Image (cartoon, rainbow, N blue to C red):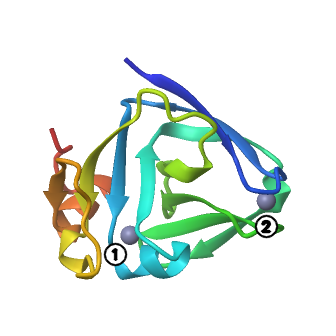
């Protein structure tokens, strides 16, 4: 059952609405996400392109060959990671308006997690290469 989600940045210049296929929240421990957010990135995968209000306030940073990162140019809130050149988005869980029903189920780039924290949730843990293969279409969807 898909879920409608809404969210916004801290200052409210950017808001979005999207459809998520599941209630699953994932965490990325990779060095780029940690530098970008100041901690591990919590996100939900959504279907297609979110509908954005305040699109002009969205800045895009191309962080790698495969990924782009969207943020609010006014307040700096991190809003999404997306596959470069494709309409495949992961929205930051912290920017969502409501967290009802969301479940933290997966951790990716587990090999890059620094030793100073661990999550107590029971999650599926994936290596970065396996997780990225799903986004770039060279691997199977995780169960
Ligand atoms: Zn903002
Ligand atoms: Zn990452």
In the picture, the quarter occupied by the N terminus is top left
Left or right, 79 with respect to 64, comes to right
Q: What element carries label 2?
A: loop
Which residue is the site of mark 2?
75
As drawn, the residue found furthest toward the top would be: 1
Q: Quadrant of ligand 2?
A: bottom left
In primary-sequence order, the first of circles 1 and 2 is: 1
Residue at 21%, 57% in the rendered image: 138
Residue at 21%, 43% in the rendered image: 141
In the picture, the quarter occupied by the C terminus is top left
Residue 29 percent coordinates (x, y):
32, 71
Where on the picture, by quarter, is residue 70?
bottom right
Q: Residue 30 carries which label?
A: 1
Left or right, 102 with respect to 110, comes to right
Q: Which mark is residue 1?
A: none
Tell me if the residue at label 2 has its CB under 8 Å from ligand 1.
yes
Residue 42 percent coordinates (x, y):
43, 56
Q: Is mark 1 on a helix, strand or loop?
A: loop
Residue 81 percent coordinates (x, y):
51, 60
């Amino acid at each position: 059952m898909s879920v409608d989600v809404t969210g916004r940045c801290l200052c409210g210049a950017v808001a979005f609405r999207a459809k998520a296929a599941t209630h699953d929240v994932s965490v990325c421990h990779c060095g780029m996400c940690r530098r970008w957010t100041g901690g591990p990135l919590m996100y939900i995968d959504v279907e297609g392109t979110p509908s954005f209000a305040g699109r002009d306030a969205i800045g895009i940073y191309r962080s790698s060959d495969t990924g782009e990162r969207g943020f609010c140019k006014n307040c700096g809130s991190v809003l999404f990671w997306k596959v470069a050149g494709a309409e495949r988005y992961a929205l930051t869980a912290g920017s969502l308006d409501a967290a009802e029903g969301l479940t933290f189920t997966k951790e990716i780039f587990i090999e890059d997690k620094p030793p100073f924290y661990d999550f107590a949730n029971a999650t599926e843990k994936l290596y970065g290469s396996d997780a990225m293969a799903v986004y770039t279409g060279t691997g199977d969807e995780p169960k």
